[in-house]
Image (cartoon, rainbow, N blue to C red):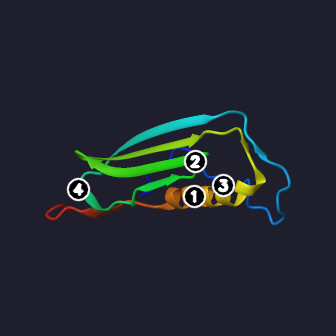
């Protein structure tokens, strides 16, 4: 089960074969925090949670964590872009940043049946 079902922050914007010659321009600084709570199905418990992610490149940062709260999974993430114009010299870092987010979004929580439930 992938906690991040609602929306994706990853982008293939920079996954182009040719090198960039211009700064990467964004519309504005951005800070998004999402919190999703997903009730666990009856008779199931959490076996494995995805690892938390904490990446900060200065001009962008991303943090996510999945935890169990009561009989729910809570997935929290914060995506922050602090600069409107990212110089070409940082394009490689930005590409890496989006790959980390993309990997995080593909992570899954693993559920297991609770003993005694059929």
Cα separation, mark 4 vs mark 1, equals 30 Å
Give the left or right position of residue 47, taking residue 103 as reference. Answer: left
| Residue receiving disc 2 | 58
Task: Tell me: residue 27, above or below residue 75.
Answer: above
Give the residue furthest to the top.
28
Q: Position of residue 22 (x, y in %)?
A: 84, 50
Label 2 CA crowd tier, 10 Å (few <14, some 14–19, many 20+): few
Judged by depth in the image, the label closer to the viewer, 4 or 1, is 1
Dots 2 and 1: beta carbons under 8 Å? no
Inter-mark Cα distance, 1 to 3: 12 Å
Quarter occupied by the C terminus: bottom left
Of labels 4 and 1, earlier in sequence is: 4
**Residue occupying the point 74% across, 56% down:** 89
Q: Earlier in the sequence, mark 2 or mark 1?
A: 2
10 Å crowding of disc 1: few (<14), some (14-19), many (20+): some
Q: Are marks 4 and 1 in contact (CB under 8 Å)?
A: no
Per the image, label 1 sits on a secondary structure element best described as helix
Residue 69 in the figure: left or right of residue 5: left
In this view, the mark in front (3 or 4): 3
Calculate the distance from the C-alpha at mark 2 to the C-alpha at mark 4. 43 Å
Label 4 sits on residue? 43
Give the class, few, some or many, for how many residues have Cα within 10 Å of label 4's Cα (few <14, many ≥20). Answer: few
In primary-sequence order, the first of circles 2 and 4 is 4
Which mark is drawn over residue 102? 1
Q: Is residue 33 above or below residue 23?
A: above
Measure the C-alpha gap from mark 2 to mark 3. 11 Å
Instruction: Judge whether residue 6 can be spotted in this image.
Output: yes
State which mark lies toward you, 2 or 4.
2
Label 3–label 4 contact, CB within 8 A? no
Query: Is residue 4 visible to us here?
Result: no
Is 115 displayed left or right of 48 in the figure?
left
Q: CA distance from mark 3 to mark 4?
A: 42 Å
């Amino acid at each position: 089960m992938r906690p991040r079902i609602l929306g994706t922050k990853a982008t293939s914007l920079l996954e182009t074969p040719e090198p960039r010659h211009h700064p990467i321009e964004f519309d504005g600084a951005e800070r998004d925090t999402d919190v999703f709570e997903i009730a666990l199905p009856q008779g199931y418990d959490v076996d494995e949670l995805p690892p938390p992610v904490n990446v900060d490149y200065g001009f962008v940062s991303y943090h996510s964590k999945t935890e169990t709260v009561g009989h729910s999974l809570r997935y929290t993430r914060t995506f922050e872009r602090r600069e409107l114009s990212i110089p070409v010299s940082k394009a490689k870092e930005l590409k890496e940043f989006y790959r980390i987010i993309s990997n995080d979004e593909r992570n899954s929580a693993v559920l297991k049946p609770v003993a005694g439930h059929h």
